Image: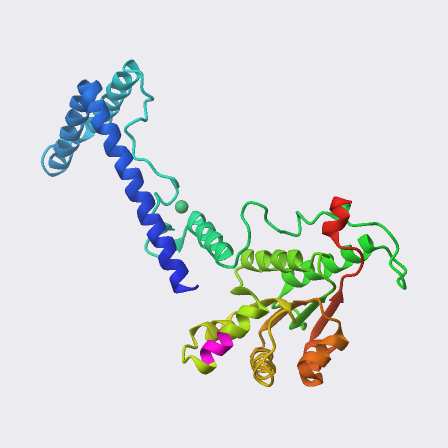
Amino acid sequence: MRSDILRAVEDEFAARRARNRAEEERREAEIARRCPEVLRLREERQQLIYSGIRGMLHRQEELRSLPARMDEANRRIAAALREAGYPENYLDPIFDCPRCEDRGYTGEPVREMCTCMKEAVSRRLRGDMGLSEAAPQTFESWRMDIIPDRPLPGLAMTQRQLSAIVRTQCEEWANRWPDSPVQTVLLGGESGLGKTFLLHAMARRLLERGQRVMLLSAYRLLEECRRAWFGGDDSGLKEILACDVLLIDDLGAEPLMPNVTIEQIYHVLNERLTAGRATVISTNLTIEELKGRYTERIVSRLTDRTSALTVRLQGDDLRRAARG
Ligand SMILES: [Zn+2]
């Protein structure tokens, strides 16, 4: 768990509790103004609770009658609220999540993160990675019907059929990792065929499965390398090397600095492979173009048959197909 994300979520929960307390106070003030009778009844009930605590010490009889008297007090408060035109639970404590009462954790003595907080953490992780909430790119929302069903030259299948196969391969890998010998996924194809969509869908699925995921452009990857090598700040690079799955979008679009870029990319890929971590790469370049740009040495590591899955989308640009 990234500590900055967790801290931000805990702050979010503290703000949520403060907001709900403020609303409770506002309601109390409103009721005090508009039907003071309710507040008087609540004070009586409070006294009853105090006397109950004292009764625990001295008077067993009073203690026995306490539940019935509490019920009666609650009934009278509810009736007074109803009469004043308010819902019966108007003065109850307000919680966004009744399960953890907005603390984010449940369980005693073993504290466990509540589902609402888990969701808040993954929402923040998704936002952090630029995964859209408004139009989520998921395997489920991948639309087969907008992909042309025309035969691909040189292949015995249509663009839609090929896309379906690639989608399935990506999804199965995202469902299985780390339970898979494939450590590297190279997702190729020209722009507009859905590579970034699939990359985002994979990142989401891996996040749902609790994997530590990083998704970034090749451009930002190299920025972080440069910051570590020449700027003395290796916090970003450390994260890049340590996450379970690194997803690099659009390898080949970054500016190439002779020697430096190649060394940095090799360093990242090699470290991750050696450590048994996974890397998923999308690129517009063909294998031959990759070799020309990044050397044979790097490309052979990326496409090694025993540890890599190489898939390639082909066909017409979907953005044009959707318009036309
Ligand atoms: Zn909760």
In front here: 260 or 146? Answer: 260
In front here: 58 or 124? Answer: 124
Taking 87 as reference, is 297 above or below it? below
The residue lying at 70 percent from left, 74 percent from top is: 308
Taking 155 as reference, is 73 above or below it? above
Taking 152 as reference, is 66 above or below it? above
In front here: 106 or 199? Answer: 199
Which of the 4 image quarters holds residue 31? top left
Query: Is the C terminus in the top left, top right, bottom left or bottom right quadrant?
Result: top right
Residue at the limit of the structure toward the top, as seen here: 83
Residues rendered magenta in the picture: 224-228
Which of the 4 image quarters holds residue 85? top left
In front here: 134 or 33? Answer: 134
Which of the 4 image quarters holds residue 82? top left
Instruction: Inspect this view and state whether residue 286 appears.
Output: yes
Instruction: Inspect this view and state whether residue 244 appears.
Output: no
Taking 133 as reference, is 308 above or below it? below
Position in image of residue 61 (x %, y %): 15, 28
Position in image of residue 231 (x %, y %): 42, 79
Q: Does 83 appear in magenta?
A: no
Dominant secondary structure, magenta: helix
Position in image of residue 241 (x %, y %): 51, 75
In screen coordinates, is 291 left or right of 154? left
Residue at the limit of the structure toward the left, as seen here: 58
Query: Is the N terminus in the top left, top right, bottom left or bottom right quadrant?
Result: bottom left
In screen coordinates, is 9 left or right of 305? left
The residue lying at 19 percent from left, 21 percent from top is: 33
